[in-house]
């Protein structure tokens, strides 16, 4: 059976429930959404909360599949669908937009921005993810990887207007969902890991007219002149940061407050990671790793709160920012709730940006606490690799990452998907499973109990205490949905989609989706009937962590799908291939390997590892394990593919910058790795020569 009532599952759910707490409800006026789910987080508050109650704790055991829609050609699916007046809208891996009938699952239209054709060079800057679309007044908005912001007619899928939001030559790329601001649409971008300078841009939603832009890091002194926000930020940088890189890109979290007419943006990590490279004389490096409040009409700076000064660990403020009213010390207070990748949970005053409280949600080794008087962390020593090496928890993926947390005013709890894993940062030391990011070696670390695993946390934002948690065996899991039926929904890397009691954490229902889930679910109603939908497509930033993210899903073996559930649903999924952890490597016994080529190819493989897996450790998404690839078995076919770009439409970039010798060296490394997997070659202890991302 695919759908299982979980009375027998409680013992295996690994629930930790902390007694002695009461589930105190909080003000619920205006929180979340009901029939329509018209924004990426449900409503502008980004609470991922549904006020619908037809599906609730008492009857969720009756939940079944209403319909499913296969999505051929898709790989990593990170978006949360929108639901507007009986139609679902969502984006796929490369910003393909789908419109689907919400009751039947019938595809109404499909739009492909064809980034591979418009901007082929941008295909080298990402691994094929898109986190969703926006909707307002009959228009659907999506950002293509190359930065084109596109407005579509919601009924037909036809283009209304297109704007280039990223200038030619910049290393930025867009993967996040746009947000609406009362007739305006705002979009950010990524690229901080390459040193790109972050910014957000706002446009008129009806015409596409450019309105304003705000940068999250300063430019050159000439560019900053006359801009108070940039002049203030520049005082926190040293050296020639506008040449070495700054980072601070806004690629996910943005929350609009219509009452205050403000947009709160979450700025990403600094880049380069090593602060001695980008700002050698010290400084906080504003506005990286910060929440920044802007006037929605003008883009003018209002306030900021920096969560990590002088970021050195890829810590980012990009996870979703929840706007709500909480009763604190007996008084209602409008707040922002945030769980960034650094492992703390922050509550800020939405009006002023003042820190109200902050506590660790899990294993945190970089700071003792957050000083509530100064708002700054009390840091541990040697956290910026002053001695050449530092090991940090959380690692670069968090903590909490882009997978949405949700908030229920009924329970007063925030439901946070978290990871526990460390990262080793070192200057000059090479390692097989490490990335050289602009001169700094970055490698995942497994050391403590539950490292390499994820959790679902129920967190009280007022008391800053854990109420309950569910331990997951896999690291990289999906976002959450909270409902007024006192339910919390979450999908996990192992392919299960589960419903939990929001007050106790008891698992009440689960469904085998046949593939890992990383997206957040959503809920909507049509003609009074409530539905729950989720996109199924494991992937995203899995390949850079290799075996630590490998759950056994093979490239192309399991279909990507949109699943929609309803009470008493009877639809069955067709059987799909189960997880398979074996590496089915291919080998040509006649091939003689040159060891110098193997070593050189190991260093060059960083160009491939973000999709095909660090150290050749494929995770099934967003690209195949090259040890199993028939194309990579023959040098001629491998070389032709890299040079021709024949599979660009499927997400495989053209590597015209590689020479024939370099291609031959990468090929040799792949073939050596395949033989190691087959037991035909002793694993190499060689360290890769320096190579930079």
Image: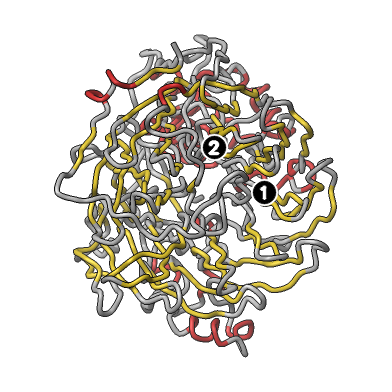
Which residue is more in the foreground, 13 or 376?
13
Cα separation, mark 1 vs mark 2, equals 18 Å
* Residue at the disc numbered 1: 145
Instruction: Give residue 642's position: percent from left, percent from top.
Output: 67, 33
From the viewer's perspective, is 173 left or right of 292? right
Q: As displayed, is residue 279 above or below residue 391?
A: below
Q: Residues within 10 Å of mark 2 (few under 14, many from 20)?
A: many
Residue at the (80%, 61%) spot, across then down: 206
Is label 2 in a helix, a strand or a loop?
helix
Q: On the picture, is 164 further left or further right than 232?
A: right
Q: How many marks?
A: 2
Relative to 82, is 332 on the left or the right?
A: left
Residue 559 drawn at (x, y percent): 59, 21
Apparent side of residue 398 relative to residue 71 in the rendered image (left or right): left
Which residue lies at the image location 49% right of the left edge and 51% below the top edge?
Answer: 692
- Element on which disc 1 rests: loop
Instruction: Determine if residue 550 is in view.
Output: no
Q: In which quarter of the view is residue 370 placed? A: bottom left
Quadrant of residue 507 within the rendered picture: top left
- Which residue position holds label 2? 608
Q: Residue at x 62, y 66 (%)?
A: 200
- Answer with the quarter of the image where residue 154 lies: top right
Residue 232 vs residue 386, the one in the foreground: 232
Q: Is residue 88 above or below residue 509?
A: below
Residue 323 vs residue 636, the one in the foreground: 323
Q: Earlier in the sequence, mark 1 or mark 2?
A: 1
């Amino acid at each position: 059976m695919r759908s299982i009532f979980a009375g027998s599952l409680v013992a295996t759910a690994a629930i930790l429930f902390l007694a002695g707490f009461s589930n105190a409800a909080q003000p619920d006026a205006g929180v979340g959404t009901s029939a329509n789910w018209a924004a990426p987080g449900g409503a502008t508050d980004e609470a991922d909360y549904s006020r619908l109650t037809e599906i609730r704790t008492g009857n969720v055991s009756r939940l079944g599949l209403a319909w499913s829609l296969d999505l051929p050609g898709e790989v990593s699916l990170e978006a949360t669908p929108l639901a507007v007046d009986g139609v679902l809208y969502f984006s796929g891996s490369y910003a393909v937009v789908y419109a689907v009938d919400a009751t039947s699952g019938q595809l109404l239209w499909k739009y492909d921005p064809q980034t591979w054709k418009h901007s082929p060079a941008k295909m080298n800057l990402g691994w094929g993810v898109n986190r969703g679309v926006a909707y307002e007044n009959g228009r659907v908005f999506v950002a293509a990887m190359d930065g084109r912001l596109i407005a579509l007619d919601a009924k037909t899928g036809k283009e209304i207007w297109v704007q280039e939001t990223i200038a030619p030559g910049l290393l930025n790329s867009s993967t996040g969902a746009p947000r609406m601001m009362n007739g305006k649409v705002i979009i950010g971008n990524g690229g901080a890991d390459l040193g790109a300078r972050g910014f957000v841009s706002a446009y008129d939603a009806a015409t596409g007219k450019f309105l304003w832009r705000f940068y999250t890091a300063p430019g050159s002194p000439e560019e900053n002149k006359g801009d108070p926000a940039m002049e203030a930020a520049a005082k926190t940088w040293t050296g020639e940061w506008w040449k070495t890189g700054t980072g601070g890109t806004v690629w996910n979290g943005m929350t609009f407050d219509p009452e205050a007419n403000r947009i709160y943006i979450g700025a990403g990590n600094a880049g380069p990671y090593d602060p001695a490279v980008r700002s050698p004389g010290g400084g906080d490096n504003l506005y990286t790793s910060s929440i920044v409040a802007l006037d929605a009409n003008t883009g003018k700076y209002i306030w900021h709160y920096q969560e990590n000064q002088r970021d050195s660990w890829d810590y980012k403020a990009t996870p979703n920012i929840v706007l709500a009213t909480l009763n604190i010390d007996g008084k209602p207070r409008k707040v922002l709730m945030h769980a960034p990748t650094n492992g703390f949970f922050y509550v800020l005053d939405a009006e002023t940006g003042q820190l109200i409280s902050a506590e660790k949600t899990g294993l945190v080794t970089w700071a003792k606490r957050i000083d509530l008087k100064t708002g700054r962390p009390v840091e541990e020593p040697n956290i910026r690799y002053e001695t050449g090496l530092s090991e940090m928890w959380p690692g670069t993926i968090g903590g909490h990452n882009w997978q949405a947390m949700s908030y229920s005013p009924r329970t007063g709890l925030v439901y946070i998907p978290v990871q526990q894993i460390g990262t080793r940062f070192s200057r000059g030391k090479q390692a097989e499973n490490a990335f050289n990011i602009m001169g700094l070696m970055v490698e995942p670390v497994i050391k403590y109990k539950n490292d390499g695993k994820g959790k679902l946390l129920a967190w009280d934002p007022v008391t800053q205490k854990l109420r309950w948690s569910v331990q997951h065996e896999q690291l990289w899991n999906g976002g959450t949905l909270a409902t007024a039926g006192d339910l919390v929904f979450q999908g996990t890397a192992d392919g299960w989609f589960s419903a939990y009691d929001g007050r106790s954490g008891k698992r009440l229902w689960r469904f085998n989706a046949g593939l890992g889930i990383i997206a957040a679910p959503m809920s909507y109603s049509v003609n009074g009937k409530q539905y729950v939908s989720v996109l199924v497509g494991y992937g995203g930033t899995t390949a850079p962590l290799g075996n630590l993210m490998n759950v056994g899903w093979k490239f192309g073996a399991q279909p990507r799908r949109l699943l929609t559930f309803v009470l008493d649903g009877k639809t069955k999924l067709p059987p799909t291939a189960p997880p398979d952890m074996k590496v089915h490597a291919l080998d040509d016994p006649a091939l003689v390997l040159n060891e110098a080529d193997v070593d050189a190819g190991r260093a060059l493989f960083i160009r491939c590892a973000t999709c095909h897996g660090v150290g050749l450790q494929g995770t099934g998404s967003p690209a195949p394990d090259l040890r199993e690839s028939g194309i990579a078995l023959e040098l001629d076919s491998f070389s032709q593919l890299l040079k021709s770009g024949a599979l660009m439409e499927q997400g495989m970039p053209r590597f015209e910058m590689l020479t024939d010798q370099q291609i031959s060296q990468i090929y040799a490394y792949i073939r050596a790795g395949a033989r190691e997997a087959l037991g035909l070659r002793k694993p190499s202890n060689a360290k890769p020569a320096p190579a930079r991302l």
